[in-house]
């Protein structure tokens, strides 16, 4: 599974950045998550960006003044991070000492592991007393009438771990609060999202990157208009 995730994201760099240039979605998620996390801790001097991707969230956290370490399984993603510290690794087995960080952020990443509980326990291990963890996971895309955009299609857009599993994993380890962020988006944006090979794997995990993107594009070709994209956030704290 981890080998497949790494290969998916190694193949997704250009498409990932194209989606971000179009929507600025991951920047928005990082900024909102940072704000929620800062409200719940007295110290935000060092942060582990777990599943940093191309460094979009890393740059948001670093601009806030914190020492930021970008960790990702994908070497090709990490090459885009920039000036922050970079570590290739798995957030299910973090290569850091106990109590090394004030904060750990999983900006649009924790749902990509089939066992988010292991990652949550590792986050707790590397956090200092009173440290804060934050995660964001996709709830999907909804039409104006409240129906899921995939309801009438022959595929469901599914993550390795669903939102409930992500939330439970953090609830088992931290004292958490949760909420939902909603973004107006377009059908074209939904198609662009699924042009990212790693995200098209939500629909066609058994196909090659090019094949799954082609199939996803065909599947979503008739989707039109404006829809709402929803993301759930979960923020937790350790005992001081």
Image: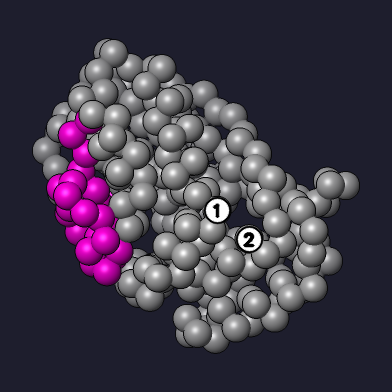
Residue bounds of the magenta highlight: 66-92
Comparing 85 with 240, the one in front is: 85
Q: Where residue 37 sits: x, y (%)? A: 39, 25
Q: Where residue 20 sits: x, y (%)? A: 47, 56
Q: Where residue 131 sits: x, y (%)? A: 28, 23
Residue occupying image coordinates x 84% and y 47%: 144
Q: How many marks?
A: 2
Residue occupying image coordinates x 20% and y 25%: 45
Q: Residues within 10 Å of mark 2 (few under 14, many from 20)?
A: some
> Does residue 218 show up magenta in the picture?
no
Above or below residue 24? Residue 3 is below
Q: Which residue is outermost to the right?
A: 145
The numbered mark, 2 or 1, whose residue comes first in the sequence reads 1
Above or below residue 149? Residue 37 is above
Residue identified by numbered label 1: 23
Q: Secondary structure at mark 1?
A: helix
On the rendered image, what quadrant is the C terminus found in?
top left
Residue occupying image coordinates x 60% and y 83%: 214
69 to the left or right of 184: left
Residue identified by numbered label 2: 189
On the rendered image, what quadrant is the N terminus found in?
bottom left
Comparing 171 with 185, the one in front is: 185
Comparing 15 with 199, the one in front is: 15
5 to the left or right of 215: left
Q: Secondary structure at mark 2?
A: helix
Above or below residue 152? Residue 146 is above
* Colouring method of the image: one colour
Is there a contact, CB below 8 Å, between mark 2 and mark 1?
A: yes
């Amino acid at each position: 599974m981890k080998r497949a995730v790494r290969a998916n994201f190694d193949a997704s760099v250009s498409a990932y950045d194209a989606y971000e240039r179009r929507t600025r979605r991951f920047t928005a998620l990082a900024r909102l998550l940072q704000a929620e996390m800062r409200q719940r801790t007295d110290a935000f001097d060092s942060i582990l960006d777990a599943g940093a991707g191309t460094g979009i969230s890393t740059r948001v956290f670093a601009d806030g003044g914190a020492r930021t370490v970008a960790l990702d399984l994908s070497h090709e993603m990490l090459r885009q991070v920039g000036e922050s510290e970079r570590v290739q690794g798995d957030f299910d087995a973090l290569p850091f000492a106990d109590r090394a960080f004030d904060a750990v952020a999983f900006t649009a990443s924790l749902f990509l592991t089939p066992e988010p509980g292991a990652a949550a326990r590792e986050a707790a291990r590397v956090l200092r007393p009173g440290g804060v963890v934050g995660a964001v996971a996709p709830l999907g895309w909804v039409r104006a009438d409240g129906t899921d955009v995939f309801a009438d299609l022959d595929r469901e857009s599914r993550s390795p771990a669903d939102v409930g599993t992500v939330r439970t994993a953090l609830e088992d380890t931290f004292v958490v609060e949760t909420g939902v962020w909603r973004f107006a988006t377009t059908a074209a944006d939904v198609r662009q999202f699924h042009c990212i090979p790693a995200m098209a794997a939500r629909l066609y995990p058994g196909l090659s990157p090019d094949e799954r993107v082609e199939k996803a594009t065909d599947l979503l070709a008739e989707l039109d208009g404006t829809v709402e994209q929803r993301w759930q956030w979960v923020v937790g704290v350790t005992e001081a």
